[in-house]
Structure formats: structure tokens, C-alpha cells
Image (tube, rainbow, N blue to C red):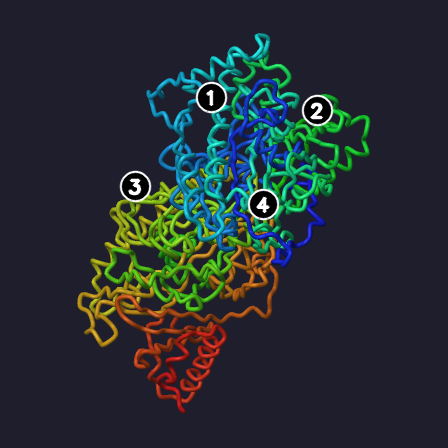
Amino acid sequence: MNRLIVFLFVVVAGWPCLEIAAAETSPPRPNILFILADDLAWSDLGCYGHPWHETPHLDRLAADGMRFTNGYAPAPICSASRASFMTGKTPARLHFEFVTKNQPGRPQHRGGQLMRSPPYTLNLPLAERTVAERLGDAGYHTAFFGKWHLNAHHGRYLGWSPTHGPQQQGFQTAVEDFGSHPYSYGKGKKPTPITEAGQFPVDSMTNKAAAFLQGEHDAPFFLMASHFYVHTPVKTPCEWLLKKYDEKIPAAAPNRKKQIAYAAFLETLDHYVGQLLAALDASGHRDDTFVVFTSDNGGHPEFAGNGPLRGSKWNLYEGGVRVPFIVRRPGQVPTGTTNSTPVIGYDLLPTFAAMAKAPVDVAAEKLDGQDLTAVFEKTEQGPDRSLYWHFPYYHPEKGYEKAQADIGVNDFAVSQTHPHSAVRSGKYKMLFFHEDQRTELYDLSEDIGEQQDIVQKTPAVANEMRQLLTTYLDDADARLPRPLQTKASGANAAPTIKPRKPNILFVYTDDQAPWGFGAAGNPQAHTPNIDRLADQGARFTNAFVTTPVCSPARASLMTSRYASEYGILDFIPHPRHKLYEADKQIGLDPRSVTFAEVLKESGYATGLIGKWHLGDWTAAGHRDYHPTQHGFDYFMGLTGGGTTPDDPPLEEHGEVRKFQGLTTDILTDRAISYIKDHAEEPFLLCLNYRAPHGRWLPVADEDWAPYEDLDPILPHPDYPDLDVKLVKRKMREYLASISGVDRNLGRVLRTLDALDIADETVVIYTSDHGYNMGHNGIHHKGNGVWATKTRPPSTKNINGKYRPNLYDNSLKVPAIVRWPRVVKPGTVIEDSTTSLDWYPSLVEMAGATLPEQHTVRGRSLVPLLRGESVPDWDQNVYAEYSMINYCRAFMRTYRTPEWKLVRDFLDPARDELYHLSVDPEERVNLIGEDRPEIHKIIAHLDREIRRNMQDINDPLLDTIQQKPTGVTP
């Protein structure tokens, strides 16, 4: 989308790489106590001038340290700010601008809306390196207590996820506890009233954090105490506090009843902060501990007055983002000081890292924060810079307008937020509203309440601020809202936004043969949607994979490398499989760079729905092997290989549960939801169907109907001793499974049409490898199974049931690309391609750049898709399969359009040679022919096999020396 037209923002420049090195004169590394309040307004504390709130402990903290008058939260709502605290990046750069939910979606404004907001981000990506991970690596004991709010709600509201909770993000100690907050009450339960003055509810969260502070510490600690106070519901059992504030708050105070409850609630928070500070004093670590107190956003409009600031939580006026910000470090931070330097929550990561002497490269890591340690050590103004906010959402609630008359200066109208962004630079602050491209400009030095819009009086400043915002939003690759419809033409009309990059829908089936659809010439396959896709795009007739079984093929697809380079030789077994070895778990190397990571870095939303099979089979398994560690923001499906065709156990939101229905339909349902949620931004969705992997039945009645009375055509009916009845039954079930995929593909394509994004979406359809169905007497793939009535005898390495192979029907796959306005409909491409080629193709389609640190072995298919002549295209194919499950065969092949040599380095007697130009079905093995021309061909192809093995440093090279049968010395 054209971000410069629709938006505005940022340059984060001039902040050099933070080289935080230990110096002889630098102070020792302090402990760090980070206390975070929830929804606390800037003016709520006594030390910030509130006329009736009593906060003695926080006032004392300010008196012992430094109070900032221009402290800011990174966002006007909980999760976005917390993600920014954790990473040192703005919510815009993180694509984490809203609160987490329990399922994918986007907020809907009940009063109607003109723009479509980005979807929720459900989890802080594990790929982000948090402050806890950095300090933990620097030798700190990291601990977290309280409100996390950075994962999809798990089990209950705000419940921690087993895959994205604090312990998965670097906290060695983590305690999930609501404390005494009303969230802890439970349905129908109320706390015992407290009437004795000075008594407060026991807060288990605070007690546990205090116990941690007073414990034994062999290393410096980083403790984050994340309170639920003063978030709604605002209820307290302290009747003595309610009585005190009923007497203290003026009768004419606006919204008085709620102000009384809120004042009591706030003093309760202050008491718990005092309890933590007392525990720190008792521990003996007061003098060597840096303490910071702040809030995740401004006050809730229904309770916090926020005066004299305009706005509140949910919007970017000062009342939504300006917050208390207090620091203390005895001997380093001057006591009783006030500082007007603008500081913000995403500064905390580089600041903590500097204190911990943990190296941070701000520029290289694209961090937005800066180290504040020098600012803390002196009272004068720190260096000037720009601060940025981005909230591309509508406020989801409309009911606040009912209370507008009660609020006073902080009117509820501004809480009915529309998509907007903001920048503060020096004394000026500008807000930009995306619906009508309107700007507001305020001079905060004279108008802290943002009442006098000076955009007309100072157009030059307004233009400069707008350019700052535009530059930043582009630099951060911010997600922007898009118009739902084009407004009427005119000077004030918002321009229609078109994405700069195409969406990419990558449909990846499992075990689909190259002959398994109508457009490939199969008259019995009922696949109207696959065939229509081929008619509308390009169909490759010689598309190969590099290994004809699941896990290695998928590793090659994701990385454009041969799977043997990563040690993935065969399918990865299920933990309950007889071949599973717990001490030999393997998965996709975390050091690899997948195409999903490249596209994500380029600004794509990335989702994988369906089969992964490149790591542990459980959601709680090895995190390095999970799809979310390899570039996917969202995952729903099966991390392992097989599952049932109906009522499958699938992972969603980090939890495996059983679903009801046909697996292919369930995955399609989720894919359609994902597409709807991401229709307004470039997305990469890998829809990895489990079908047509066996078992094939049950299928929907409509998918079975074309085959119920079918007499299947067999490819090799004359193969000696072929079990024709068995193969025909399997063929019917297999084709029905493919029809189930086809029906669901139709649903997805219709969704693209209905959302009017079909022309903006590249659709790719292919499979992980091919399949045999009676071909050469076998069924299955590279680990083929004999389909004959009797089986050959077993040998030392080969169980008589299996026929390891590198037949074309195992290596060839369907490959179709529909790319509107680029690919000519009905194109047929006969050039030989491999699955290695998808990676560079997707990167080029996305307008991204191949990673320098990752070797890509494929070649982009884009020139072929554009219809360009590519004379130097390599028509030869190299493939591999080291079968180590069930039996053993170390096979490598080199295939030209005319000849194909298959070597089994475990047993040269199993070598194969086929003259493809006269024997495309590979029925006559010429390896034993004693003819000079055959010897010459074998020698040439053998050299090519070994050359390819050397190019990829095939580990098999260390164990083999023999030449194939038919090669003369």
C-alpha cells in the first residue's frame, strides 16, 4: 500500500550503536526493580500534584530519586506498551499495536467505521529478543510477577501461554498471580470488608515478589513487578478508605462516586509499592538497586480525571500516553530532582542493558529506544529527539458517551478513538487522523491540555512534523488502516490504497501425485478448482522435489537447501512411533533463514495453517523447531506429520485440542478467517493440507460421489502379480481425498473473490512430493510399499515390504501459479524446476531481498512465469533420499531430460539407469547393459552426482567410494 499517501512518519536516526563496554570508572552493575502500574494517569500521584490522592510511598520514591514530567508510555493500551517495554521497539515496528485476544480478529467500532484496521497480534513473537533474555545472557537472575498480557489468552482471561509466556521470553522465575485485584475474586465471590484504618487486602503477588527480593542472590537480579492495579474493575474491600475519600473529595468534584472508589484503589497500589520497597530495604540491596516506576498507559476515562491533560487510555492525546515516570538509584541519581526530558517506555531496554553491560546495537537491531543512564545522572534537559505513536484502530466501545457530562476536562468523546498516529518533537506535538487525513498541532509548552490547534497558524511546523511522521511510519513498516470504500472525489477525499506487494497464498498438499488432477490429463480426477487455477495461470509439467518424503522435502522448500545439509534425512517420527528416539530429536535448524522470515522482515503478515513436520510433535516441544521460530507470526495445525482425516488434534494458540469435523475443512475454515483478517495488508499464508496423505477416508459425501462406482484406470495393470483389487480401492479413496482438497481450494478462491483481493494475490498450488499408485508395482512415495500379491524376499538392508525409490512419480509434483496481470492464463511451462526454486521466487514476488547470510540453492521462477526466454536454465535435476526409517538405502540421482541414474551407495546392486526419452515410465533398468555408450552415460551421470554431493558437502561422501555398476575404472 502507498504509505506515503495514506500516512506519515519517522526517522529514527542519529542514535549510534550502543557499545556498552565495562570501564574501570563505571559503577558496578546494579540490580533492577521495574514496577509497572496498569492504567495509572500522569496526574494521579501526590508527587505529580493531585489534590486529594494520598500516595506516600511513591511520593517518597520520587523524593529519593528523580521524577520526570514528560514521561510517556509507548502506546495508549496495555499489550502494545508492554511489548514495547520488552523489546525496545515501538508498537508500530513490532506490528503489535492493540491488546491481545483469545483468537484472531480485529476490533470493530460499534458506531460504524470507514477504514479497516490491522488484525490483532496474539503473541509477542519469540524471535524478538526481550530485555529479560538480554539481561539473563548477561548473568542476571530474571524474575516476573503479575500481569503479562503478551500472549493469546490461555485457559482464562489473561492466562499465560505455555509457548509464549514470560518463561519462554527470558524470565527464569515467573509467577502468574492476580494478587488481591478484583480479577482474583472469582464468580460470585467477594472479599471480606476491611474497616480498620491502615489495613489492606493481602496481595499474594506482592508477597511473592517481596520474598524474591529478600532471598539469596548470587548474581544481580532483574525483577519486573507488573501490577494489575489500577485497571478496572475498580473495587476495594477497604471501607475505611472509601470513608476517608468520601470525606476528602469535594462535593462538586465531577464523577464523584467513581472518584472515591478510584482514590481508594490507587492508595492500595501505593501500599503494595511500599511493601516492595520495604522488602528491598530489608534485603540490604537498596543502595545497589535501580528502581523505576511507571505505567503502561494513561488513565481510564471513567475513573482517572487525567486533568489537566486531554484524552485518556485508548487515544494519543496526552492523557492517553503521558504517565508518571520515577527512577531511583542511590549515589547515581540525584535525590529530589525533577527532569523535563521526554522519555518513553521503549527506552528502558537499552537503558537496562547499559546498566547490565550487555551489548546492544541499536541501529543494527532497529531498536527505537535510547540509553537514559546519562540523563538519570544529571538534572538538566537531555538531548532532544522525536517520539512516535501509532494506533490504527477504532475504540471498540461506544457506551462512554453516556457519561460524558460527568467527566469534565477529560471528555469521553475522545475515547471513541478513530485510527490515528502522533509525533512529539521538541515542544510540538502533532496528531494525524487517517480517515480524513486531518492533522492537529499543539504547542505543549503553552498548551499541555491540547486545546488550541495551531496547525493553521504554523503551517511550516505542521508540514515538518507531518514529514517526520510519514518517514517514521515507512521506516517502521507500520501497518496502516485501509479504506473500506473509496470516498467521493474532492480535495478532502482519502485516496484509495493499493498494496505495494502482492498477497501470497501458498497451498501445499501432502503426497499429491503429478497425475492427480484433471489438468494433468487424468480423466477420472474430479478437480474443477485445481483445473480452473491452472487455466487462469501457469502449470509446470516438470516440477520436482529434492527428496520424496515429508520432512526432508519440507525443509528444502522452506530453506532452498538440500535437507541433508540440515541432517534431516527421512520423515521425523511421532513420539509414540516405534522409530522415535527421544535423545535424537531433530528439526529445522534454528540458524536457517526461511522464506517466511524474509517476507516477515519485508513487512508481510505470515501465517502457517496445517502441517509443519519439521520439529517436535507437540506444542510444548522444542521451541527452536516451532513454526513461530521460523518466521510465522501465526500457526494453527499440526507440528508433526500425520493426523486423522477427521476429528483431528490440532494446535491453536499454543494449545493442542481435538477438533470436530473433516481435517481439510477445519484447516480451510481457519485459512478463510486468516485471509479475512489480513485482507488489507500484504500476507503470506502457507495452507499446508494434510490430504491426500493416507489414511484417506472419511471424506465428504460430495467428494466420494464421483468415485463410488468408478472403475479406476491403472497405470501398470500388467505389472507381474499386481494386486489389482487393492490398487483400485486405494485409487478411489486417494482421488476422493484430492477432491476434498479441491472443494476446499474452491472455498478459498471464492473468499479472495468476495474480498476483491484476487487480483492482488499470487496463488501457488503444489505438493511436498509425488505418489505412486501401482506404478512399477508399488504404492506410496520414496519409501514405497509393494502393491503386489507377493513381496520379494527381505535383504540385509531392505524389508521385503518396502521399495525405496527415486522414481519420477515420487519426485514430481503438481505446480501451478496464478498471478494476475503477470502470468498469462493457460501458460504451460515444460522447463525442469525443483522445490528449491520456490524460495527465491517468493522473495522476488514480494519485492524483498535474499538474505546475505543464507545460501539459496534455487533459482527464481519469475522470469519463466513472465514468459521470458531463459536460455541458460538448467534442465537437469539432482535429488537425494537416505532412507533410515523402516529400512536403509542411501540414494542419489541425477536426471537429464533424456537419462536418469539412481545410485544406492549402500548397495550398488540396486543402482538404476533409465532412458527417459524412450522409457518415461522407468520400466526398463539399463544399469546392467554391457555397452560402451551405456558405460559412458553412467560415468558422466555418476560424476554429476558426486559433483552435486561435493557442492552441498553431503555427509555421505565421507563413507562412500565405490563406483556404480557399469562404470569402468
Q: Furthest-left residue in view?
A: 790
Location of residue 703 in the rendering, given as x and y in whole percent from the top left corner? 32, 44
On screen, 23 above or below 912? above
What amino acid type is highlighted by mark number 3? Lys
Location of residue 607 in the rendering, given as x and y in whole percent from the top left corner? 47, 46
3 and 2 marks in contact (CB < 8 Å):
no
1 and 3 marks in contact (CB < 8 Å):
no
Q: CA distance from mark 4 to mark 1?
A: 31 Å
What amino acid type is highlighted by mark number 1? Val
Give the numbered dot on residue 540: none
Give the numbered dot on residue 450: 2
Give the numbered dot on residue 658: 3
Q: CA distance from mark 4 to mark 3?
A: 38 Å
Label 2 Cα neighbours within 10 Å, binned few <14 / some 14-19 / many ≥20: many
Task: Name the secondary structure under disc 3.
Answer: strand
* Mark with earlier residue (1, 2): 1
Q: CA distance from mark 1 to mark 3?
A: 38 Å
Tell which tag, 3 or 2, sits nearer the viewer.
2
Label 4: which residue? Answer: 88
Location of residue 361 in the rendering, given as x and y in whole percent from the top left corner? 62, 54
What amino acid type is highlighted by mark number 2? Glu
Between 356 and 774, the one lying in front of the other is: 356
Specify whether residue 180 is in view: yes
Q: How many marks?
A: 4
